[in-house]
Image: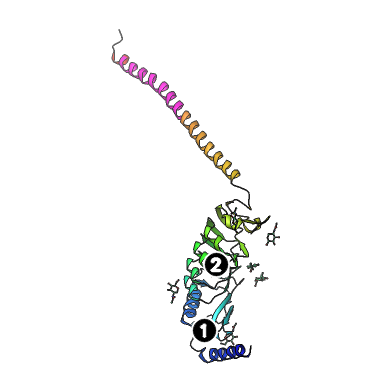
Amino acid sequence: MGFFWGRRHLLAAAVLIFSAAADPNDEQCLTGLSQSLIDPLQNLQNWTKATFANPCQGFTSFLQGATCNNGRIYKLSLPNLSLKGTISPFLSNCTNLQSLDLSSNSISGQIPPDLQYLVNLAVLNLSSNRLSGEIPSQLALCAYLNVVDLHENQLSGQIPQQLGLLVRLSVFDVSSNKLSGPIPGSLGNRSGNLPRFNASSYEGNKDLYGYPLPPMKSKGLSVMAIVGIGLGSGLVSLILSFAAVCVWLRVSEPKSENEHEGKISQLMPDY
Ligand SMILES: *[C@@H]1O[C@H](CO)[C@@H](O)[C@H](O)[C@H]1NC(C)=O
Ligand SMILES: *[C@@H]1O[C@H](CO)[C@@H](O)[C@H](O)[C@H]1NC(C)=O
Ligand SMILES: *[C@@H]1O[C@H](CO)[C@@H](O)[C@H](O)[C@H]1NC(C)=O
Ligand SMILES: *[C@@H]1O[C@H](CO)[C@@H](O)[C@H](O)[C@H]1NC(C)=O
Ligand SMILES: *[C@@H]1O[C@H](CO)[C@@H](O)[C@H](O)[C@H]1NC(C)=O
Ligand SMILES: *[C@@H]1O[C@H](CO)[C@@H](O)[C@H](O)[C@H]1NC(C)=O
């Protein structure tokens, strides 16, 4: 025990001494993120180039929303700050990041697949933004992910099958997006009689189906209906145009004959 605490104190002292040498990866991460985000209300205090070079002193952070651990950024929490812009792929240079919360802003663009390099990431909360595009399947490489909250965005495409590999997931919420396709079995799978994640995690999407949501059959019917209407209206317009051509031929043929006859009869001297 004494040895353990001794080491901890030594470590803290070392961190204080060497904290001037900031981590170049964190600097790249913060610089990239501040360039991609737009902060119209100037909520981000100390988010300046000078601070990026030295954002942490041991366990103290000089950046609003950042928490430090051993001189590295390990938590970024910037919810509800009216932020716009996009999420920089350079965010992945904050390699010690364990928790990322950019929820309840107006951030748009895609979720960068580069987040896969955040191998320590446990909490990802990007809910209530304007993110679009697909959920990157690469997120499955963040093996420690515990919380994935992406609700209330404009994400489209299917839920990547690979996310089912995240064995530590305890919260998964993709409700209120524009997702479609089947819910991967491993994410809707029952344990006993209870779903791993219930319907509230999936509601409010465009075309998601499968347990714990209803199966595809109703959607299958509507597709059949659309095909039926399409075929039916195609057939009707075909018949109509055929009929129109027939009528036109009937009307125009004798008419031209009459005209022809008329011309001939005009040419013929009338005795
Ligand atoms: C901004 O930095 C100064 C010193 O560099 C620090 O005292 C202050 O607490 C920081 N502000 C925030 C919001 O972290
Ligand atoms: C978000 O920020 C607005 C304005 O600063 C505030 O009125 C509101 O209570 C905040 N909402 C949450 C959920 O913190
Ligand atoms: C920083 O992140 C970018 C985007 O993912 C990557 O291309 C670059 O190699 C990273 N830099 C370092 C030093 O890892
Ligand atoms: C994500 O953030 C939103 C809004 O800030 C919050 O209401 C929600 O509880 C968070 N999700 C999780 C799983 O903590
Ligand atoms: C549910 O998950 C278990 C392992 O967690 C697996 O053995 C089983 O096949 C899954 N069932 C379905 C229907 O996907
Ligand atoms: C669904 O799960 C969430 C979180 O686990 C819980 O708060 C909610 O009550 C559940 N809803 C239903 C209908 O079971």
Asked if residue 251 lies in the magenta stretch, the reply is: yes
- Tell me if residue 227 can be seen: yes
247 vs 148, nearest the viewer: 148
Residue that label 2 marks: 107
Task: Please say if the residues under marks 1 and 2 sit with CB atoms less than 8 Å apart.
Answer: no
Q: Nearer the viewer, residue 110 or 9?
A: 9
Q: What residue sits 51% from the left and 37% below the top?
A: 230
Residue in view at x 58 percent, y 57 percent:
186
| Magenta stretch in the rendered image | 241-264
32 in relation to 269, above or below: below
Q: Is mark 2 within 8 Å of ligand 4?
A: no
* Image position of 250 (left or right of 56): left
User: How far is mark 1 from mark 2, CA to CA?
Assistant: 23 Å
Q: Is residue 160 visible?
A: no
Quadrant of the image for the N terminus? Answer: bottom right
Residue denoted by label 1 = 51
Question: Under 8 Å from ligand 1: the CB of mark 1?
Answer: yes
Q: How many marks?
A: 2
- Residue 254, compared with residue 68, is above or below; it is above
